[in-house]
Amino acid sequence: MKALLFTCLLVLWMMAASARRFNDESRLRPGSLPNGYISEYLKSRRARRALPAADAPDATPAPRESDGGADLPTCLLCVCLSGSVYCEEVSPDMTTVPLLPKETAYLYARFNKIKKIGRNDFGDTVTLKRIDLTGNLISEIDDAAFSKLTLLEELSLAENKLIKLPALPAKLTSFNANHNLLKTRGVKANAFKKLTKLANLYLANNQLEAVPFIPESVRILHLQDNNITEVNTDTFCKSDNSYYLRLSLSEVRMDGNPVVLSKYPDSFTCMKVLPVGRYR
């Protein structure tokens, strides 16, 4: 019995000695690491703890870019709804064409203070079908401002300060430039020649001295309150074709002009209606 007890005590003593030896060996011995390692390590930890929160690594995932992010400012000032943008009488004053959401088809930016339309203002919105800029302060439009808008059908520049017209898209069916400062020299001879689908042409309340070229497709023509002083047999008809009929033209207004229409009876023989205007 005593021998068994002695053996157990011996085993326990040997296990304790082994544990002490392991602990001693696991401690860092002087000189076992490069000089200053511990102090530099502690300094580094203190420096990291002292970093302001803004410099700490951010584990938050980066926000996903949104295709409409650039559109947000316009849609805060205006109403964006199903391909239409309504920017009417915007406050604070809107002085330039707003950046439009992609795939905008209809823009209504009436009664603002837009002064100029640049070459690239509509360059990225080739889906536009209607633009209404009535009642602004537009005095200058780059000649290529609408060149990329191959789908544009309706354009209103009424009640502005234009003295010349830019090149117009070929698919226009309605163009309104009433109440501007247009003179004949500001409207190129072929301004409307290529607009083979144009049905409504409004050029009233300007300073035109002559009737511009009118495409065959035009049904409604408003030229009232200009400075037109004469017409001739080629203004609406064709002097070299006595059989020519212009049946599509159903409404022509020339009232408020100096021209006395009764002096030019041969100028309307191809038309089914006479222009509204001064006959005596």
Image (spheres, rainbow, N blue to C red):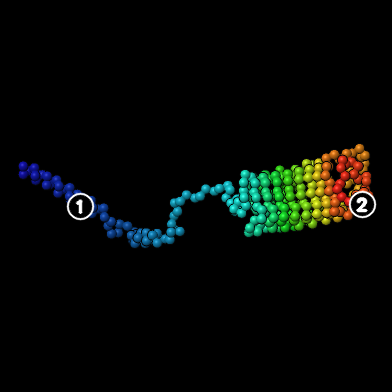
Residue drawn at x 83%, y 54% as measured from the top left: 225
Total numbered labels: 2
Identify residue for label 2: 280
SS state under label 2: loop
Q: Identify the amino acid type marked 1.
A: Arg
Give above or below for 25 relative to 217.
Answer: below
Q: Amino acid at mark 2?
A: Arg
Q: In this rendering, would 41 be left or right of 245?
A: left
- Residue at image location 8% in from the left, 44% down from the top: 5
Q: For mark 1, give the secondary structure.
A: helix
Pick the residue in front: 80 or 29: 80
Say which residue appears at 49% left-offset and 50% top-offset. 62
The image quarter containing residue 97 is bottom right
- Give how far across and how far down residue 195 sits, in percent: 79, 44
Residue found farthest to the left:
1
In-front residue for pair 9/88: 88
Q: Nearer the viewer, mark 1 or mark 2?
A: 2
Q: Residue furthest top?
A: 243
Q: CA distance from mark 1 to mark 2?
A: 129 Å
The residue shown at (81%, 46%) is 221
| Residue linked to disc 1 | 20
Contact flag, marks 1 and 2 (Cβ < 8 Å): no
Using a 10 Å C-alpha cutoff, classify the residue at mark 2 as few (fewer than 14 neighbours), some (14 to 19) or many (20 or more): few
Q: Which mark is residue 173?
A: none
